[in-house]
Image (cartoon, coloured by chain):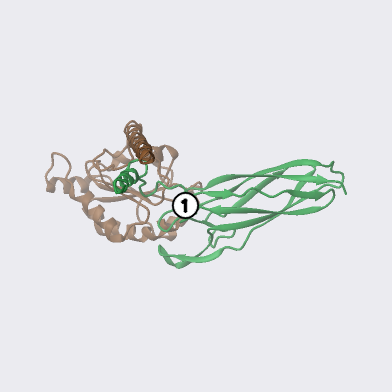
Chain colours: A green, B brown
Amino acid sequence: MTRTWLVPLFGLLLGSPAFSQGPGERVPSVTVAPVSKVQVKAGNPASVEIDFRIGSEFHINSNKPRSELLIPTVLTLKAAEPVSLVAVKYPAGQDVTFPFAPNEELSVYSGDFTITATVRASAKAVPGDYPVTGAIRFQACDRSACYPPRSTPVKFTVTVVGR
Amino acid sequence: MKRNALLFAALLIAILGMLGAGKFLNRVRQHSPTKMVGDVRGLAAPNFELATLDGRRVKLSDYRGKAVLLNFWATWCSPCKVEMPWFVELQKKYGNDGLVILGIAMDDSDAPKIAQFASEMGVNYPVLLGTDQVSEQYGNVEFLPTSFYIDRDGKIVGKGTGLLARSEIEDNVRKALASPIAGMNRAQTSSAAQTTQPAAQ
């Protein structure tokens, strides 16, 4: 049996109002990949790589945008005692020009990027799991418009083991 | 054969579901308090009162009789910066015909920083400090730049989201200028435009 009747049906389906999206109705997103297990010995530091993915067609400012007016991407983390946050290292942005400003180079992230956090367990830390929570704040644009700053929550667990 | 029938039934249910969802969404849109979503042409521009950069209060209704280009922007919006010199030119070109451009800054920054930026961009039209309330009144402006083109009678004649071509912006400005005030002829409209208080920054 021929299935030519499927073609108009799919057409109807895709043309239905629930599928239609006008300009400006897409929402920029930055998603966080699950962080792999972080283990640290009491008294020592450990590096944590946190992977992010930016929604296709969008870019966000890097941590060091080229103008003070632009809103940088910032990862804020809070660690619970006896774990502390030592440093957050951001990747360098890509220098890009866009059709809307061909003479202005912007420092941005697009696609996937990784931020490295360094945590430390105090020397007297009792072995166990300790949560680290926070958020990445970003301001996204596409090729013709920009969106207000948004935040995505970030969390992972640091497991302190004995020396 | 039986499989085809099942497939057909599943697709039919999916289509009916989508159509139902579409109708529901439309109903939600129609019942939103401002109805400022979708095609807003022909709707009355919601009135608002906002502070200027120097602390005065300005209402949209102060500009009745003028064509208004209401531009939502922010200092962190690079495409917005592209439009601003065009707006400066359009304000010079059509100001005497009754065009008023109002920039609504949707920044979290304080007024002096916005004023400095506007000054560096050579902005020659009033800049107002935007609020969440005015954003909601205009359909939750989340996408910058967004501009509304309002005729002399306070009706929206065009909307632009994202960076538009300069020619497209100018076409919308002409449309806003072209509509006479209800009950007035063209000469009276021009006279009304001349006597309406111009905005100072």
Left/right of residue A125 with respect to residue A107 in the rendered view: right
Q: Residue furthest bottom?
A: A103
Viewport quadrant of the N terminus of chain B = top left
* Local crowd size for mark 1, using a 10 Å CA cut-off: few (<14), some (14–19), many (≥20): many
Q: Position of residue A82 (x, y in %)?
A: 80, 43
- Residue B131 in percent (x, y) is at 44, 40
Residue A27: where, in percent of width, then height? 46, 47
Of A143 and B155, which appears nearest the observer?
Answer: A143
Chain letter belonging to callout 1: B
Is A35 situated above or below A112?
Answer: above
Give, as a three-letter code, the residue at label 1: Ile
> Which residue is located at x 87 percent, y 44 percent?
A124
SS of the residue at dot 1? helix
> Which quarter of the figure has residue B40?
top left
Left or right of B15 on screen, residue A31: right
Looking at the image, is A132 positioned above or below residue B170? above
* Residue identified by numbered label 1: B114
Decide if residue A90 is on the left or right side of residue A61: right
Residue A43 visible at all:
yes
| Closer to us: B32 or B171 | B32
Give the quadrant of residue A89: bottom right
- Any part of residue A80 in sight: no
Q: Nearest the camera: A6 or A42?
A: A6
Q: Using the image as rendered, state which of residue A56 and residue A80 is in the foreground.
A: A56
Q: How many marks?
A: 1
Q: Is residue B40 left or right of residue B10?
A: left
